[in-house]
Amino acid sequence: MNFVEELRWRGMLHDIMPGTEDLLNKGMMSGYIGFDPTADSLHVGSLAQIMTLIHFQRAGHKPYALVGGATGMVGDPSGKSAERNLLSEDVLQHNLNGIKQQLEKFLDFDCGVNSAQMVNNYDWFKEFTFLNFIREVGKHITVNYMMAKDSVKNRISGDTGMSFTEFTYQLVQGYDFYYLWKHYQCALQMGGSDQWGNIVTGTELIRRKDAGEAYALTTQLIKKSDGTKFGKSEGGNIWLDPAKTSPYKFYQFWLNTSDEDAKTYIRIFTLFDREVIETLEAEHNAAPHLRTLQKALAMDITIRTHGDNEYTKAIKSSEFLFGNTGIEFLDELNAAEVLALFEGVPNYTMTLDELAQGVNVVELLAAKTLVFPSKGEAKKMIQGGGVAINKNKIGTADDVYDSSHLVGGKFLVVQKGKKNYFLIIAE
């Protein structure tokens, strides 16, 4: 497998330094990508870089994931309009642990000579004094060179200006590359296209400091066809941590991709080969309403991120909400998973004691909760057969519900029509 060609046909490649492809074709090469540790989970915006490392390893090369324990204390100015909040060492260590657990789902850390390896730049910066840094690093890169970078020029000419901390960021990242080149034989740094300036500062430092050769490769920044930011939903970031973004919501994020974006994403975010993808595209084009591409995309990335069981639950959750799956499915979920499934659905709380005594259904839906604005409207729709609790149509307006009707001892699921859900939580 040719790594650069793999990125090229998948539409991932943006820039590559001359000589990089030739060097990669000579044999195993070590390369790295840096990951931001400002949270204890990566999000789907990080997946393009994770996929780059996956293809790098599958091509027989050795991937390093650098998690910036030191640079996380500084903040990267690229594309940002404000400086990041600085994090404490304890918070950073917690974040690093979470990120490593996630990377282990995607990369093989135990496969011999090209096993993936995770490194933390705090390990080599923690004893580095300021005086040593400006003597060993600062003297090799001119201010003119640093000022020429777009990330610097854009900030200096803007309203907010740029702190000295951020100005020195490219030297800190450049030294990361030098250190990994010197001690881990990493001759290639990869990243998103917005990182090109910082990456080539590293290659320049290696050349000026030790007369060494190092290389750079960047991938396309992921954008949505409608111009909105990739990786965001109404609730914010789509995280890889199931506690932050449920596997169901994660699955739905990919399933709801537009046709145009799905054709791009299935190349970038899955491991399907070219022949499989072209077959899926042909099937999708023949019957777009079946959403073949979206289903294949959502399946592949959900299984690799969360596993087969969570993918199966996500499918069943979709069928529960939009199909004919019975209420017994909720017994397979814990309380947190039920709440995640009904995220965004109007919910109401009442006491267990109140429900244990038995509550008339009209009272339940129009007084104890606000599923209906009035008892009259509740009665009318119940009589018309348009209201269900726990997937069973309500028989009459005189029906009584008590704690024995609760799913999982905690929930009543109300439907007005087929698609309007409400959740009653008994506590």
Image (tube, rainbow, N blue to C red):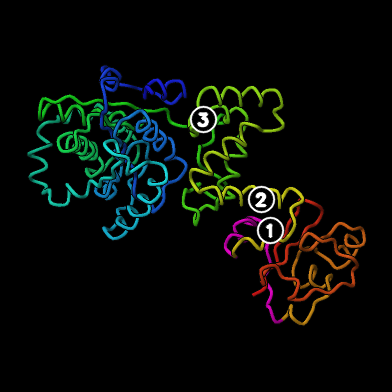
Residue 148's quadrant in the figure? Answer: top left
- Mark 3 / mark 1, whichever is N-terminal: 3
Element class at badge 3:
loop
Q: Is residue 86 above or below residue 18?
A: below
Which residue appears at 22% of the width and 49% of the height? 122
From this view, report whether residue 293 is shown above or below residue 20. Answer: below
Asked whether disc 1 touches disc 2, contact meaning CB atoms under 8 Å apart, the reply is yes
Residue located beneath label 3 in the image: 272
Marks 3 and 1, how far apart at CA: 31 Å
The N terminus - image quarter: top left
Q: Please name the amino acid that badge 3 sits on.
A: Phe
Q: Residue at (70%, 33%) from the top-left corner?
A: 290
Q: Is residue 342 within the magenta segment?
A: yes
In front of the other: 373 or 46:
46
Q: Is residue 75 left or right of residue 222?
A: left
Q: Which residue is mark 2?
A: 316
Q: Earlier in the sequence, mark 3 or mark 2?
A: 3
Q: Which residue, given by chain and number where applicable, does mark 1 sit on?
A: 329
The magenta region covers: 335-353
Give the residue displayed 79% in from the left and 67% down from the top.
Answer: 365
Q: Is residue 328 left or right of residue 265?
A: right
- Identity, as a three-letter code, of the amino acid under mark 2: Lys
The circle on residue 114 is none
Q: Quadrant of the C terminus?
A: bottom right
Residue 316 appears left or right of 61: right
Q: Amino acid at mark 1?
A: Phe
Badge 3: residue crowd in 10 Å (few <14, some 14–19, many ≥20): some
Label 1: which secondary element: helix
Specify the quadrant of the image occupied by residue 344. Answer: bottom right
Within 10 Å of the Cα at label 2, are there few (<14), some (14-19), or many (20+) other Cα atoms? some
Instruction: Verify whether residue 41 appears in magenta.
Output: no
Q: 164 or 65, which is in the foreground?
A: 65
